[in-house]
Amino acid sequence: MTQVTLDEVDFQILRRLDENGDIDVDELSDELDVSTSTIYYRMEKYRNKGILQGEIAKLDPQKLGLGMTAITEINADYDGPGYEEVAEKLTSLSGVQRVFFMLGEMSFYVLSRVRDHEHLQTLMEDIIQTEGVENSTTNIVLRSFKDEDRLLVNYDEEDLEALFS
C-alpha cells in the first residue's frame, strides 16, 4: 500500500471534496490563502496518485425506486471456480452495489439495492445459481441509520489529524 505525504492544504482540499463532491476553487483559494492554480495542481496530483478517483454524483436510491436494501452473506465452494471468478460473477448481477470477499465464516458479503420483493427474488435466484455459490443468507434492511459513501466525514478531528500529520 502506497502512502503519500499530505500537508494541511492537501487535507483541507480533500476534506472539502469529500464533504461536497465538488468545490468552488476560487472560494477555497480565498479561504486557504493559496492560488487557484495550486488547488488545481494538487487536485491533479491526487488523481495521478489515485487518491481522487472519478467524479460521481450521489443519487438517492429511494427517489429512484430502489427502496429495498438487501445484505446477502454467501458461502462459496472453490472446487470449481476460484474466489475471484465467483466475485466477478456476483459483481455483474443486476442490483448488486458492493461485493466484499471475507475472512471468517462467510466467503462474500453482498449489498444490493432493489425495487421490491419480486426484484429481490430474481436477484436471489441469480445468486443461488451462480457457479461456486454453495449457500446464502439474505437480510432485508428495515431502516438505515448510516449509509455513507464519503470517507473523511466518518472520522472525528483527532483521527483526521493523525491521518494527515
Image: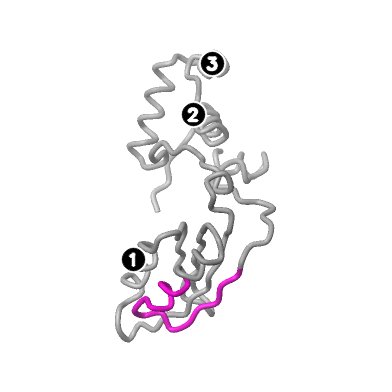
Classify mark 2: helix, strand or loop.
loop
Tell me where residue 115 appears, x and y as whole percent.
53, 57
Residue 142 located left or right of residue 114? right
Q: Is residue 119 above or below residue 159?
A: below
Q: CA distance from mark 2 to mark 1?
A: 31 Å
Instruction: Choose between 72 and 160: the one closer to the eye.
Output: 72
Q: Position of residue 10 (x, y in %)?
A: 49, 30
31 and 98: which is toward the camera: 98
Which residue is drawn at the image coordinates 46% and 57% (left, top)? 97
The amino acid marked with disc number 3 is Glu
- In the image, is residue 46 part of the stretch drawn in magenta? no
Per the image, the residue denoted by label 3 is 27
Amino acid type of the residue tagged 1 in the rendering: Glu
Q: Which residue bears the numbered disc 1? A: 88
> Of 158 and 26, which appears nearest the observer?
26
Q: Residue furthest front?
A: 118
Which of disc 1 and disc 2 is earlier in sequence? 2
Q: CA distance from mark 2 to mark 3?
A: 12 Å
> Residue tagged by mark 2?
22
Judge the density around disc 2: few (<14), some (14-19), many (≥20) Cα neighbours within 10 Å: few
Q: Indicate yes or no whether the magenta region holds residue 126.
A: yes
Q: Name the image quarter holding the N terminus.
A: bottom left
Look at label 2 and name its amino acid.
Answer: Asp
Q: Nearer the viewer, mark 3 or mark 1?
A: 1
Residue at image location 46% in from the left, 75% down from the top: 107
Range of magenta residues: 124-139
